[in-house]
Image: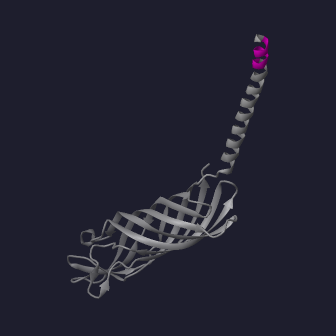
Amino acid sequence: MKNSIFRIILFSNPISGTMKTVTATLFILISTNLCAQQESRWKLGLEISEDKLSGENYVATSGIISGYTIEYTELNYSIGILFGFNLDEKATISSGLFFSNKNVSGGIICHTCNVIPALIKQQYLSVPVSVSYGILTSRLRPHLKLGFINNVSLINELENSNEYFSSNGYFIEGFAGMSLSYKLGTNWEAEIGYNYRTALTTMYKEASVGDYTRNKLTTNSLAIGMKYVIK
């Protein structure tokens, strides 16, 4: 009887060990396959854009200077980093941190002087939040974008008359646009796009003067960038 039990134990141990080995092997294979199939959802990118500003042609000030006429002739741009998270195969939510230059030029209008040329320095720390939708799933993909931009003032002053300039330290832009991306291998992606932006809140403290409704700033933005898929 003891010999029979001993033979059963000897017989069962190899089977038990084999089953454990097979189970462990299958678990490793399944886990490896699942990890291989699951792509990273995170992207990190660098983007730069040329920004063409337009809007109202007059801004009021205080003191002896009654205001200034605006000419949107300065070269403006935005540059910064983007973080993207793929919600699914086509939809992506993004944010980032940008330096935005929004300079304008024009002539100061005052009660006791002639028109004086002036540069209005406007520089912002911008935080965009957007959702994009990829129309196709091919290597070359068009996207539709919608979002808003938080702008925190870094420099906002008249070149010659800072004391008369009254700007808000924060304003919000809304934007809609489209882009075209192209996959460069497994990890890299190049993108070019266009955004139409408009101010949703006022850039300056006085919202209106006489017949002028202030702060109708709009921007046509052409951007290029590179993105890296984080594995």
Find the magenta span and give its range: 3-9
Per the picture, the main secondary structure of the magenta-coloured stretch is helix
In the image: residue 38, left or right of residue 106? right
Residue 92 x, y percent position in the rendering: 56, 62
Numbered label tally: 0
For the view shown, which residue lies furthest in the front direction? 1
218 or 154: which is nearer to us? 218
Residue 138 picture quarter: bottom right
Residue sitting farthest toward the bottom? 211
Work out whether 34 lies above or below 140: above
Name the colouring of the figure.
one colour
- What residue is drawn where x is 68% and y is 50%? 37
- Looking at the picture, does residue 185 appear above or below residue 150? above
Q: Residue 82: give x, y in percent of width and height.
A: 52, 58
> In the depicted view, which residue is nearer to us: 48 or 85?
85
> Where's residue 183, x and y in %?
67, 61
Q: Tell me the quarter of the image containing the N terminus.
A: top right
Query: Which image quadrant is residue 145 in?
Result: bottom right
Q: Is residue 93 above or below residue 102?
A: above
| Along the line of sight, the residue nearer the viewer: 19 or 44 | 19
Q: Is the residue 94 above or below the residue 113 in the image?
A: above
Residue 56 in picture, x, y percent from top left: 37, 82
Q: Residue at x 41, y 71 (%)?
A: 173
- Asked if residue 171 lies left or right of residue 99, the reply is left
Q: Nearer the viewer, residue 52 or 229?
A: 229
Q: Residue at position x 30%, y 83% from top?
A: 115
Report if residue 24 lies within the magenta region. Answer: no
Query: Image quadrant of residue 112?
Result: bottom left
